[in-house]
Structures are given as C-alpha cells and as structure tokens.
Image (cartoon, rainbow, N blue to C red):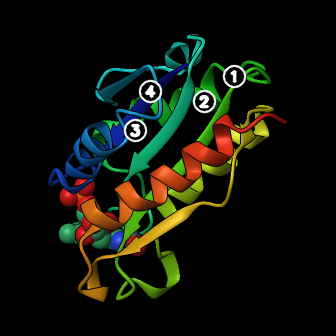
Amino acid sequence: MKLKILVGTMTSTADYVAQAIQMDCADLVEQIEICLMDGLDISAFDEDALYLICTSTYGSGDVPDNARALYDSLDSTPKFLGHVRYGVIALGDSTYQQTFCFGGKKFDERLSGLGAQRVGEVWCHNASAGTMPEELGAAWCREWLALALSPA
Ligand SMILES: Cc1cc2nc3c(=O)[nH]c(=O)nc-3n(C[C@H](O)[C@H](O)[C@H](O)COP(=O)(O)O)c2cc1C
C-alpha cells in the first residue's frame, strides 16, 4: 500500500511534518509520497493509495493558499470518493480560538461529504503548545498507520 501525503502549507511546517513521517514510517508502508497541494485538484484522489491530509490554517480559519485550488475543486467538481480512506493532520495555533485547526477540519468535512472514509480522529497540533509537530506528528502517524492497515 502506498501512503500519499497531501501537504497544505504557508511556511513549510506541514511539509517538515510530512518529511518526518516519510523517514519514520518507511518500514510500515511500501511507499510514502509527499505532494504539495499546489496545482492539484480532485483527481489527486484517483490513485489507489491511503491518503493523509497534512495542512495548516491561515487567514481566519482558512486553508493555506497552496491548498485553495484542491479544496475548492472538492466543491466545484465534486465526485463520489467512496474508495478513499484518509487521515488528517491539522496544524494550528490556539491563540486563534474560534478557528483552531480549521484548515484540516475543513478538508475533513468536504472529504467526508463526498463519501470518503476517515480513519481515526483528526490530529491537531497547537503551535502555542511548545511541542515539536514533526516529532509528535510522526509518532501519531505510526499509530494511525497501524489502525489503517489492520485487517477490518
Ligand atoms: C496570519 C496567520 C493566520 C493564522 N490563522 C490561524 C487560524 O485561523 N487558526 C489556527 O488554528 N491557526 C492559525 N495560524 C497558525 C498556523 O496554522 C500554524 O502556525 C501552523 O503551524 C503553520 O504551519 P505552516 O508553516 O505549515 O503553514 C495562523 C498563522 C498565521 C501566521
């Protein structure tokens, strides 16, 4: 099984998290591909892969600029995504109380609305917590992969 990590980021933190996962979890899946969301649309979900959305939050609870086209296409050119299994890493900052981690949560809403099946809970990282998102994200991903790859 291939793990495809779709990265939405403004200042690269989400990309660093994806890279940490690629290094730490290589023994758990056949291949880990990291794709920045730039220029992607809903066809990014056409592959037979396990998907991980790894995105931060900007503006007032918005997806980052590089995730906008992909996020919008889930609405403008919707199609049934019942074959898709996915997880979500949502990066945010609790100082933005009203919109904490909305970038990842918004992707979750749209994907589940199209019939995709989320594995596990959305994992949120708080930039104000003083913890390393790369380290915690990779540890979370090991557990998430164990869940995703366990026989139903
Ligand atoms: C201008 C700006 C707006 C932000 N807005 C939000 C927000 O609405 N909600 C939230 O949870 N985090 C918000 N954040 C925090 C970022 O999502 C967080 O710092 C994240 O780790 C950045 O990841 P990145 O480097 O991959 O873009 C904002 C950060 C900035 C600089």
Horizontal side of 21 relative to 114 (left or right) equals left
Residue behind label 4 places its C-beta within 8 angstroms of ligand 1:
no
Query: In this figure, which residue is indicated by the disc labeled 3?
Result: 68
- Amino acid type, label 4: Lys
Query: In this figure, which residue is indicated by the disc labeled 1?
Result: 78
Q: Which mark is residue 4?
A: 4
Give the quarter of the figure containing the C terminus: top right
- Amino acid type, label 2: Leu
Crowding around mark 2 (Cα neighbors within 10 Å: few <14, some 14 to 19, many 20+) is some
| Residue drawn at 26 percent across, 60 percent down | 134
Q: Which mark is residue 74?
A: 2
Is any part of residue 127 visible from this angle? yes
Residue behind label 1 places its C-beta within 8 angstroms of ligand 1:
no
- Amino acid type, label 3: Arg
- In the current view of this chain or complex, which residue is farthest to the front? 27
User: Does label 4 or label 1 sit earlier along the sequence?
Assistant: 4
Along the line of sight, the residue nearer the viewer: 26 or 51: 26
**Discs 3, 1 touching: Cβ within 8 Å:** no
Element type where label 4 sits in the image: strand
Is any part of residue 107 visible from this angle? no
Horizontal side of 3 relative to 145 (left or right) equals left
| Discs 4/1, front | 4
Residue 97 image point, x, y percent: 46, 87
